[in-house]
Image: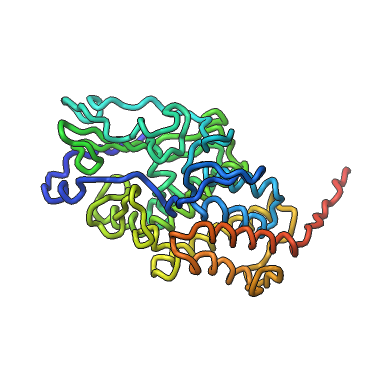
Amino acid sequence: MKAYRWCSIGLATLIAFFASVVIVYAFAEEPLGFRDPATGIVYEGVISTIHDDLTYALAIAAGFSVTDSRKLQIYNQLVDSEHISGTAYTNCGGSFNTAPTAASVCGAGPWPNVVWPQYSSMYDTNTCATSRFGVYSPFFHFPHRLGPLGQRDIGALHDWAWGITQTLRGYEAYAWGKAGELTVFSASCRYTRTTEIVTSITDTGIPPGTLQAFATYLHSLADSYSHQDCIAAMDALGMPWPTHTTLTLTECLYHPNTMTATDVHGREFFTYTDSARTDAAIGAVYAELVSRSLRYEGQYYPVSLGVTLTQLTGTPTLSQALSNFVHTWDYNHPSDRRAYADAIAAAALAQRMPIRRAYMPVLLR
């Protein structure tokens, strides 16, 4: 197993530049509670209308049943949420490897600060494998899709989600700081190691090849577009793993406690240039859903992007409707996006056609 040790950068300017790092959010959580697709009850909290509401609409259009579309929606959002308060929905059924000690990785200390992972912010430090605060956070939330690390990240997730492999190989991220070193980029010691995240059902609670695994992959795939510029910027600086910063690296600048319509993720809606990333992400996710539907669980023919949704106001094509979802409203209007995603799903439900699968008889000699 190959591991990489990252110690002090040695450049005071870089340390100052990266004095603060923030929690991972891709396609920013919006001021809109989780709506249970089974009951319609809205629970307190925040969700992403792309990971949550639009996933259901895309799954319906791709030909999945209502039940399977809801499963894809819920497990996509759970990659961020871990556990949705007030419900039984959780993906925290996994486990973690024993963490290395700072002394074994960094040498003589003292190392008083465990900078990463941020255990105190996790719902469950023993089971929530996809947590934004855990050791697998950069793997699930800042995955490389492009370049030499694309196969390591998105490629591995793809193969696990499709059941091509039964194990998911990724990497863990750790950081320790000396006195006064409280952030990832000010920490004197950063460390990653390759690991098998999934070796059986008990490791994440998500069996490989299942719709739950596929929804997890779809989330990471979308995040790979949302974080694409930040990932490239961090790679260019030689950082051991990509993440956001609250300082001045434009591609990664983000303040999750004061989210706005003009920050790095707010601009992924409406008419900002950054919204092109959202269009690309939705296109990639829909293509994967269509492929999965046709090959395995789909019960209806997928709706082509060029097909007119006759029951949707304005009768747009599906492609135009998805563009409307992204570009009509800014970040501050999640309720409008939710309502429009509902309308897309209803229109697709009304006109899709069931698949009549033909099964050839087995010929016995």
Q: Where in the figure is residue 338, as x and y percent of width and height?
A: 56, 57
Q: Position of residue 98 (x, y in %)?
A: 38, 25
The residue positioned 12% from the left and 51% from the top of the image is 13
Find residue 30 and report its horizontal and vertical position in percent: 45, 52
Q: Is residue 205 left or right of residue 98?
A: right
User: In which image quadrant can residue 250 be found?
Assistant: bottom left
Q: Which of 211 and 267 is in front in this view?
A: 267
Tell me the quadrant of the picture where the C terminus can be found.
top right
Residue 164 visible at all: no
Is residue 219 visible in the rendered structure shown here?
yes
Residue at 26% across, 56% down: 236
Residue 101 x, y percent position in the rendering: 28, 25
Q: Which of 219 and 320 is in front in this view?
A: 320
Q: Which of 41 and 203 is in front in this view?
A: 41
Question: 115 above or below 220?
Answer: above
Query: Left or right: where does residue 303 sit relative to residue 258?
Result: right
